[in-house]
């Protein structure tokens, strides 16, 4: 069973919650609309639970 997650962006971009965080636990797919900050934090937490990022998912890098 492969557990995966994906981050994508909704349009238009003029709304504060324009990201979608979706995950698949091996049996059910779920998604929520969230902010950029929430998408980053969710990705960090899901990785701790063994979820793998899907190819094509938005990737975040530090500007520092």
Image (cartoon, helix red, strand yellow):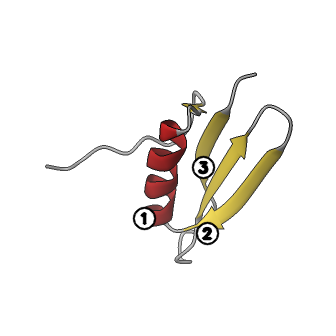
First of labels 2, 1 by sequence position: 2
What kind of element bears circle 1? helix
The residue positioned 75% from the left and 37% from the top of the image is 25
- Considering only order in the chain, which callout, 1 or 3, is on the residue closer to the N terminus? 3
Residue 29 is situated, as x and y percent measured from the top left of the image, at 81, 44
Q: Which residue is mark 3?
A: 8
Mark 1 Cα-neighbour bin, 10 Å: few <14, some 14–19, many ≥20: few
Would residue 24 appear left or right of 61 to someone viewing this image? right
Which of discs 2 and 1 lies nearer the camera? The answer is 1
Whole-angstrom CA distance, mark 2 to mark 1, is 18 Å
Give the labeled residue for mark 2.
Answer: 12
Q: Look at the picture and state if 5 lies above or below 12.
A: above
Q: What is the secondary structure assignment of the residue under circle 2?
A: loop
Q: Could one spot residue 17 in this view of the protein?
A: yes
Residue 31 in percent (x, y) is at 73, 55
Quadrant (top left/top right/bottom left/bottom right) for the N terminus:
top right
Residue position for label 1:
37
**Looking at the picture, does residue 35 appear above or below residue 29?**
below
Residue 11 shows in the view: no
Identify the mark at residue 27; answer none if there is no mark. none
Query: What's the distance in space between the residues labelled 3 and 1, CA to CA?
Result: 13 Å
Work out whether 21 lies above or below 11: above
């Amino acid at each position: 069973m492969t557990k995966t997650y994906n981050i994508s962006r909704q349009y238009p971009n003029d709304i504060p919650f324009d990201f979608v965080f979706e995950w698949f636990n091996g049996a059910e797919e779920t998604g929520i609309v969230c902010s950029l900050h929430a998408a980053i934090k969710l990705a960090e937490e899901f990785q701790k639970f063994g979820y793998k990022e899907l190819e094509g998912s938005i990737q975040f890098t530090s500007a520092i």
